[in-house]
Amino acid sequence: MTLPPDDRPLRRHRPFVLLCAEQTAGSVGRQVTALALTLLAVTELHAGPFAASVILALTYLPGAVLSPFAGVLVDRVCLRRLLVAATALQALVVGSVPLARAAGHVTWPHVYAVAAVSGTLTFTLSVGLQAALPRVVGPRRLLAANSVLTGARTAGQIGGPALGGVLVGLAGTGPALAVGGAAYAVEAVLLFALPQALDTAAGHRDPARSAPASALRAGLDVVRADRLLYRMVLAGAGLNLGAGAVAALYVLYATDELRLAAWQLGTTYAAFSVATVLGVLAAGRFGESLGAWRATRICGLLAGAAIFLVPAAALGGAFPLLLAYQLGYGLAATVWSVSMTTLQQLAAPAGLQGRVAGLTQAVLLATVPVGALGGGTLAAALGDVTVLVASAAVALVSAAALWAPVREGRAAGEEARLADQPQ
């Protein structure tokens, strides 16, 4: 069931404004928690590189493994209740760490459990919110809504680490984690204020409750049948595979081989943040003028091509080339993400939004660690530059595959539909 039509501007659309506030609060909570939990492990549990890596892996691994099953859950239960319960549980899970620390009983199993459970809940929320947005704003305003929500998340991603660092510096890791838990509690309150209509069925639900495997196949059938969506998922996997390898080698390559100073390296990362903000601002207008399908194809190529600037930096002009890479990739990848998410939501039938979002998210997340591990392993044998060139080639070829003709003509239909949207 879609919520009653609401033609007010998005900035005056109460449910959408609540989602924007929730995205900012949740993003801040995740950033503060990730930083404070890692610092607690390093400073109080004396974590080495491996233990710190395990915490990061446990944060993201559930998204790759469990997202499809989260999609089944999202399509079967009352959506608003699920979102509220997940954020409230996340507040309790994160809040358990400062309580245990105050009692002097923080242990490695506890830290690992918090990382894994929090990661599971984060990606469950991501799937649920992707399913909720089409029902909140309707299909005609999805492109603009996704752009604004990405901006709200970006604000938290930029400000969250700084806030976490200040909190740890002034009060320690325990109070910082308490603030992270409080941010999740605020998120739960905002989600509770969403319309109760989200707890009604979005489409036909099987009263017999088919087995999870059958339910997953229904979502997979949607992805496989829609050639546009199928190609975007494969192209996104290739882009993430190449980008993951580059991310794994970037710091070592920039410092050891290119001899960049710490301030130069930090500036390149700041350039990526700036590019992300610019991408959020450009995504809506770019998608309106060209259509989401053309925007996805063009930005996929630009993102893949930008990666070649990283190995090119070995030839000279390392600092400006890496700045150009972060700016170009950050801008193109942000527009790509907004446009692809919009097309995915338009392609998924009511009642299958969660499963389609979960399957897509699983594929896109799984390729990042695979690329990182593969890139690091190959670089030890072949050298950084060789692997960086190969990674850029994988990303570019994957994006170029989107330019092959789409027989079913779905791309043209969705593009025309978006072009007519009143934003």
Image (spheres, rainbow, N blue to C red):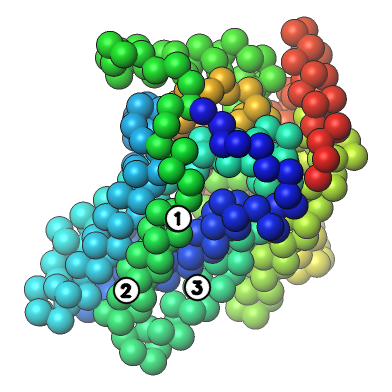
Using the image, determine if residue 72 lies above or below residue 172: above
* Image point (50%, 59%), residue name: 22
Q: What secondary structure is marked by label 1? A: loop
List x then y, in percent, for residue 146.
66, 46
Q: Quadrant of residue 252?
A: bottom right
Which callout, 3 or 2, points to the residue nearer the camera?
2
Q: Nearer the viewer, residue 250 or 316?
A: 250
* Residue 148 percent across, percent down from the top left: 68, 54
Give the Cα distance between marks 3 and 1. 27 Å
The residue under label 3 is 161
Q: Give the residue at x 83% y 40%.
A: 422
Which numbered disc covers residue 177? 2
Q: In the picture, which quadrant includes the C terminus?
A: top right
Q: Residues within 10 Å of mark 2 (few under 14, many from 20)?
A: many
Res. 125 visible in picture: yes
**Which mark is nearer the camera, 3 or 1?**
1
Q: Amino acid at mark 1?
A: Ala
Q: Position of residue 353 (x, y in %)?
A: 51, 28
Residue under the point 27% across and 51% down: 117
Say whether residue 259 is visible: no
